[in-house]
Each structure stands twice: as structure tokens, then as C-alpha cells.
Image (cartoon, rainbow, N blue to C red):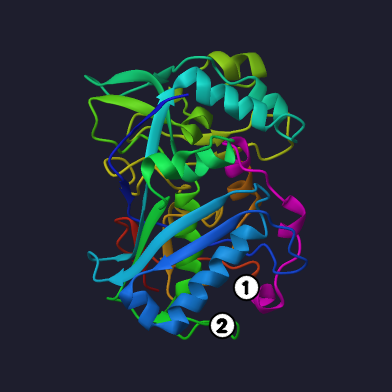
Amino acid sequence: MSFFSSPRCRFAPVGLLLGLAALVSPVHAVNIVINAGTALSANSAALAAFNRAAVKWENLLLDPVTVTIDANLASLGSGILGQAGSTLLAGGFAGIRNAMVFDNTGGALQALTDALPTSANAFVPTNRGLTNNLAASKANLKALGFTGLDAQYGVADATITFSTNFNFDYDNSNGVTAGFYDFESVAVHEIGHSLGFFSAVDSAATNLTMRTLDLFRFGNSDNPTTLAEFTTAKRELRSGATAFFDLINPLYGSPTQFGFSTGTSGDGRQASHWKDDSITGNYLGIMDPTMSSGFIGTISQADLMALDVIGWDVNYAALNVPEAASLATWVFALLGLGAFARYSGRRR
């Protein structure tokens, strides 16, 4: 299958909170390589925290692929703790869709991916169109079994930059210093974007190209309740429209719907995130768009299901054993309000 590349997506992070798959009995196959820039290399504590964040994902994902991330420290915009940019590749809808179906054969969510539509079908903003292509991060395509991508598009799968404008705690093993942000949690969140957690909703393109995760993005206008409806229902790509990740009730127990952010012209949070728990009071996972100082993020089952359906082989069992250092924060209420521009920092 042939791909065309889009400009590197700069998704300014928004959210972290979940996590920790447990560093116990690693059975991972994914290898996340951190290519540290000068500033990050000079900060050994930050680099060590970033590598611990990578190991959290490695312990949860079983695909035998290497994900390379260029990373550094720099001054970012107001309220932004970190930002991730992925190499975004697009190809024919059917080819990538069929790879998603094949990849999930035998998986817990196979019935759902088997029911994926065979062509693009979505609500789009007025005066915008929809291509019949499908786009994914290069790392996501590797998980789907596409090969030779590094040779054609370069080794780096993503770029992550951490802000130098905030006070970070680089070791959360004894908690996070009051007024400081947990660097490791920010890194976990940003890696999640690199793996493919994003949406076309905030794209400025005249004709939108659905991302793999958008295949599971629905709204109130066409809400499927059966697998047949899941195949034919229009996905929701309009900024500001209510949207949720839908696994079709009652196939997989309850809950089966998890809210998405509705975009920069919607709820003010980038659409490539869960619905902000500061709005709903319900924390969904590491891909929440905002984070408070003092908070330690964790990876949730919702986070893993989102990656599962787009092509990652998930070790759900590892999620059930929290790290000893995380036990005190395994369940934690995120409080406070603040600026929410990308991976925005929210102070209590």
C-alpha cells in the first residue's frame, strides 16, 4: 500500500493522568527509543523520567516494533507543559481499515473492528469535505504491520518537546513536590499521542482525512447501538459537537462510551483527548487534556482500549498491578481550573 505524508502534526499536549502499567514482569515487545536533544541530554533527571515513561508503555504493548522519538526541552507557549508532533501518513481507506481488522483477529474487540465501515462516512463542518483516505501516525502503522516506513519517511516517528517554563518534579517515587508538575506523567501522555491517539477534528484542511481513532468517534446525531449500526453510522468530525469513543453497548460491558474533547472551537480542548475531567468530574485516563501540579498520572483501561482498536496489541493484565510507588495515587481526584491550550498546565 502506498502512503502520502502530511505535515508533522503538532498536537500540544493536553492531559495526563492515568497510568502505570506496572514495571513488574515485563513482557513487552515494543521498543521505544528516545533520541534526546542537547537540552534533554544535559538534564539527566528529566531523561531518566522520560525513559521510565517509555517503559510504562513498553510493558503494556506487545507489538514487535521500534518507536523512535526525538525529544528535547524548550520554552513553549503559555500553559503548555509539553507538546507532541507525529509523522502522519495517509493511504487508501480500505487498505488501512483492512489492516486494522486483520490485526485484531482473535482479540477481545475483534467483533467491533470486523464491523468497521469500508469507506469514509462522517459529519464534517459546513463547507468542508471528507476524503476517502485514512491517516495514522507512523508508529500506529508499524503496529498494524506496515514495513519499510522508516526507510521512506525517516527514522523518527514523533517529536516531543517539554516546556522549560514550569517547575517539574523528575522523580515521583515519593510523590510530587507541591507546586511542581510530574515530568514523567507529561511524558506518558505525550507518548500516547505518538502512538496514535489523535483526531482530524482540529485539522484546518478543507477536506478532512479521518484518523484511525476517528473510526470510533460518534456523536448524538448518529449514535450506534448495534454492530450493524456501527458499520453504517456517521462518525462525528465537527468541532464543538458532542463526541465519544463508542464500543457499542452492551457488547463489552459498561461503560462503553467515553467522552472526547470537542475541539479548540468547542470545549476549548484539542479533540485528540478524552473529555476533560475538570468539566465532567470523571477522569478517563492519561489522555485527559489537562493536568494539575502535584498530580501523578496513570494509564487507564479506556486508554488501552483506544490503542487496541487502532492496532496495538495490548497486555491488559499488566494494567492490573500498580507500581508500589503509585499505590497512593492509583485513584486520585484531579481538582482545579486553568488554561487549557494543548497539554495545558492546570494549577490548583
Q: Which residue is more in the foreground, 300 or 255?
A: 300
Numbered tag placed on residue 329 in the rendering? 1
Q: Nearer the viewer, residue 80 or 139?
A: 139
Residue 73 versus residue 318 in the image, above or below: below
Q: Earlier in the sequence, mark 2 or mark 1?
A: 2
Amino acid carrying label 1: it is: Thr
Q: Is residue 146 left or right of residue 113?
A: left
Q: Please state the horizontal and vertical placement of residue 301, each as a whole percent of the image.
A: 66, 50
Looking at the rendered structure, the secondary structure element under dot 1 is helix
Mark 1 crowd level (few <14, some 14–19, many ≥20, 10 Å Cα)? some
Quadrant that contains the C terminus: bottom left
Location of residue 24 in the rendering, given as x and y in whole percent from the top left corner: 75, 69
For label 2, the crowd category at 10 Å Cα-Cα, with few meaning under 14, some 14 to 19 and many 20 or more, is some
Determine if residue 121 is in view.
yes
Numbered mark located on residue 175 in the image: 2
From the top left corner, tell me how far across and down residue 181 is, in percent: 42, 76
Which residue ends up furthest to the front in the rendered image?
151
